[in-house]
Amino acid sequence: MFSSELKKGSTELLLLSLLEARPRHGYEIGKLIEARSGGKLQFKIPSLYPTLSRLEERGLISGRWVEEPGQRRRRFYRLTKQGSAALGEKRATWHEYVATVNLVIEPEGA
């Protein structure tokens, strides 16, 4: 529903936010974004993995492979301490950005 340009700027924030509660695998993250947004935010699941990989390279998340009987092997990601700090900064920046954009787009005198 939203343009890819809008989603691109918020993907890291979304991923880090969903990993705050507990470790998750990529497919679960993608489906959770869709569910929590009421279907308004949808990502092709494979498109999330490069971002997860970049977050892992930067030390914001860590991943480990898990094999469970009867299921395919999945990589579960969890937020690191560095990632938790980055999430706090990204949230604050996001809230400030949205508030600032709202100041600009609202009609004068509203």
Image: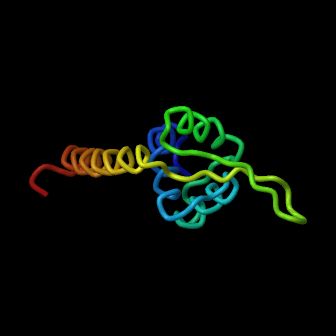
- In percent of width and height, residue 70 lies at 90, 65
Q: Residue at x 39, y 49 (%)?
A: 87
Count of numbered circles on the image: 0
Q: Is residue 87 left or right of residue 8?
A: left
Q: Is residue 94 left or right of residue 81?
A: left
Q: Residue at x 27, y 44 (%)?
A: 97
User: What's the colour scheme?
Assistant: rainbow
Q: Residue at x 57, y 59 (%)?
A: 33
Q: Residue at x 29, y 49 (%)?
A: 98
Residue most toward the right? 70
Residue most toward the left? 109
Q: Is residue 77 left or right of residue 46?
A: left
Point out the image quarter for the C terminus: bottom left
- In percent of width and height, residue 92 lies at 28, 50
Q: Is residue 12 left or right of residue 44?
A: left
- In percent of width and height, residue 32 lies at 60, 63
- For the residue pair 47 and 20, the one nearer the viewer reads as 20
Q: Quadrant of residue 57?
A: top right
- In percent of width and height, residue 17 lies at 46, 56
- For the residue pair 49 and 45, the one nearer the viewer reads as 49
